[in-house]
Amino acid sequence: MGHIKLTNVIKSFGAIDVLHGINLEINDGEFVVFVGPSGCGKSTLLRTIAGLEKPTGGDLAIDGKIVNDVPAADRGLAMVFQSYALYPHMSVRQNLAFGLENTRMPQAEIAERIAEAARMLEIEPYLDRRPGQLSGGQRQRVAIGRAIVRRPVAFLLDEPLSNLDAELRGSTRAELAALHARLSATMIYVTHDQIEAMTLADRIVVLRAGRIEQIGTPLELYNRPANRFVAGFIGSPHMNFLEGAVEAVHPEKAVATLVGGHRLEFPVAGATIETGSRITLGVRPQHICLGSGENSIPAKIRLVEALGSETVLHADVAGQKILVVAPGQHDLSPGLDIALSLSTAPIHLFNERGLRL
Amino acid sequence: MKAETPRPAGSGFGEAIMVPVRLAMGLVDAPLRWVQRKLGLGGMAAFFLLPNMLIFGIFVLLPFFINFAYSMTGGTALFLDDRTFVGTDQYARLFDCSNYIDPNSCTEDTFWTAVGNTAWFVVLQVTLMILFSLVTALILNRELMARSFWRAVFFFPVLLSPVVVGLIWKWILQRQGLLNFALYGFGFEPYTWLNDRNWAFAAAVGVSIWAHMGFYTLILLAGLQAIPKDLYEAAEMDGTRPARAFWRITLPLLMPNLLVVIVLVLIRAVQIFDEVYVLTGGGPGTSTLYLTQYIYETGFATQLRNPGLAAAASILMGMVLVVLTLIQLGLGRSSEKKGSRK
Amino acid sequence: MSRIAAFIFRRKGRNGWHWTDIVTWIWLVGGLLIMFGPAVWLVGSSFKSPAALAEFPPTILPYVTQKATVEGYDKPLDLYDATLPDGSKAVLAEVRRIGVISQMVDPEKPGEIIKVNISQRTPVRTMAFATTNYTEPFTHFDFVRYLWNSVFVTVTATLITLVVNSMAAFALSKYEFRGRTFAMLLILATLMVPLSVIMVPLYSIVSALGLFNNLWGVILPTVATPTGVFILRQYMLTIPDELIDAARMDKASEWQIYWRIVLPLTAPALAVLAIFSVVWRWNDFLWPLIVLSRKELYTLQVGLSIYSGELNVQWHFILAMTVVTMIPVVLVFIFLQRFITTGIAGTGLK
């Protein structure tokens, strides 16, 4: 019930390849988020699963059955669209009933399902209104309700929160998580917002230019990004990357010379590193401490953003930009020379091609 | 939010009307689902397009192409199979004149009379039509009380049928008609206007302007209203005189609309028939005989009908219209481009 | 032209009457008289009796001469206010007229003939609406038939136009398929082929299909209108494709998407097309004139023009029936004018 498997799925529009061989298995009841920058193919991938786009190659199986040639209507999936796509000429009730009537379901059962969904989503007072008379958040609920009443094999959600204001987005996100827990149905969720991905997903699929960059749980992605792209995409503000070359390799530690001449020690942790090779060191802004000491580098402050609970420093390490998030408030001003300590920071290593070492 | 009160979708009356429609559409749905399964989405596109294309093919495209065949055949028979091939004889007959300046010297003198009449008609009618509708549009674009009422006044005759238009004016221009009554008040003797060659021609031009001018006024008015008011305010701040503002702001910005209107009026004027046919029947004599009437009478109405000749004449007229329409489409495109550049 | 330019610059609050204001109002009032006057005159005249129609100078309102039945005379006689030779006045009935002398009788004393100079008498007139102008054509002529034919043609053609054009517009706006641009161009190219150019072959095709002297022969060639497809398509392009996708996910068939989602959302454009179609079909003249040669099939337009072309024109009936023919269009004008004017301004079509 809700197991979806993609084998080498390819999609191209004319001469333009949008998806290059996607392999992915989604388990029943899983909440999977497709995340990536705009144009990465995540929406196309979702629409291909939905059946609204036909894959150019590869196989798509739902519950073990190949559904390449099954029309969207017969795949048993339900979709929530970015614009909600509510039928403007029908009342909320009719919007919810439309899909059920198409399956020739008895009226009594339709009414029952609508009542249940309306109760769950707290949209009962609006059932006889038209979408045009509802607020953005209410429309959003109706769009989800339209999917719920169908009792689909899986829910497909295409950037469902992107049309809401920031506050509403936060609360709706929590409700969606609760809904998933309650329905325990498979959900596939597309977003370009990594915070949504991190908070909602059981597993995240990071896409770039039609290829899967990494699949994993949110923390796996955060802690062990497979490549520079994933490392930069997940986490906010994004990870700092310092370019350099390996100077010496010891059993536990290695030393790199950064562009600009500063030396930095970093743990090797089993990675094979060759002396003299070019390397990128990734450090999250939150993991850098202010203050000199062991394994520190000098930096010049360019900009100070005091947010109250934390201070964001934009600094410059011999020509390379670095971002530091320091908890609390600091009396610093641009132009000041400071020292940044990386002694306690987890350091991610990437080779020349951006792959994790 | 606009309306807070919940409104049930669809009123009772509308719902009642929709019941049989729903039923019919529902009944059609089941077989069409089957068709959809067989044909797929692309096939359904063809299905939706089919009825229109079929009708369009039979009643527009097919006649368009066999029209050329007709123009190459002779005799009075109706169906193409029964007609004899005569090559370009029909065209030769149309162009057979001993003196190309005098239509009476041609074999088909009525054709050339019709061509001449139509040419004069087009020149007069198009000039006056543009003038009147432009002036009316400019006046309606002023800050008027009850502008929509005045717009309606000038638009009213546009909806009337040509037959009604023809009859109204035939009634007014007749000997005991309103016009003679009005002139009688100024001491003129009653006159049978439509029995006078020149007056009948003038009446044809005037009546067709009366009937259609509201339509073009509306298009021009829309163009005028699209000109941003602040342009005039800026011109006024610059000390531009009103006349100069008209020539340098109004006219250039209205030009795309004006050109489209000119070509539309031209296309219609070349095809003039209905209201004049009812008004004068082409008379007196052949003084208001225009091309469409010539084609109609040659092809259908006369005892010795000659469909081939009518087809040849209609193709000649069609060529003129195609040129005009292409100009119009070109103008429309260039004005669209201008619009998108803004 | 500089004077016209001045119109544009008129501002509210300008004091006094500028000469352009005077020109404007002359133009508007003149326009009111010329545009509405003829129709009003037509309606007024349609209520006049044949005798009143033949009068010159005509009266604005319909008057008839009063008649009285006088003992000893078969027909009712016209009543006149006459000035008798002795200078007294009386209401007399005219028996006959010889030259300038009218022979009259007093209806009270029918035996005695009174001779009166015709300059000494004026008819006794009352206002009367000759409603028989309206009732007779419907009872004695085929006008009910014509009316029915016109209504049938208009309603049927409009319904088919709406269905067929909206289906084509749906295909051309919501599906991607090869040849879509070509189909659209082909439809637009039809604009270049007006009836006057193809009437000869069209006539033969309609005859070959057995539709000559058949109302369907009038209806079918008119229903695949390029303008209809065009305005509907432009409107449908504004319906978001996500709605169609949502309906597909909701298990709707393509046919259901067409009539339950797309058609209701296209209602405003459909209304405009319906109004246009009604006016077009109601007013059609040349094509019905060609296809219909049997009297009982005439539409109102054809019937009217044929009757008015007869040698002995019965103007009192023609005028009344012209008014009847005008009624639907005038109703459309009064109630739906706003739709039409915005439709024209928006699309430039007629």
Image: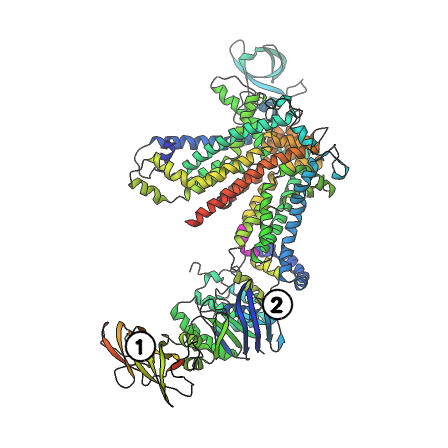
| Residue C313 position in % (x across, y down) | 64, 26
Please name the amino acid that badge 2 sits on: Pro
Name the chain letter of the residue that bears numbered label 2. A
Q: Nearer the viewer, residue A201 or B61?
A: B61
Name the chain letter of the residue that bears numbered label 1. A
Residue marked by disc 1: A324
Q: Is residue C157 above or below residue B138?
A: below
Q: Quadrant of residue A192?
A: bottom left
Q: Is residue B145 visible?
A: no
Q: Which mark is residue B251?
A: none
Q: Nearer the viewer, mark 2 or mark 1?
A: 1
Q: Nearer the viewer, residue A297 or C103?
A: A297
Please name the amino acid that badge 1 sits on: Val
- Are there few (<14), some (14-19), or many (20+) residues within 10 Å of tag 1? many
Magenta part mainly helix, strand or loop? helix
Q: Is residue B265 visible?
A: yes
Tell me if C13 is positioned left or right of C132 in this view.
Answer: left
| Residue C191 position in % (x across, y down) | 58, 43
Residues drawn in magenta: C262-269
Q: Quadrant of residue C245?
A: bottom right
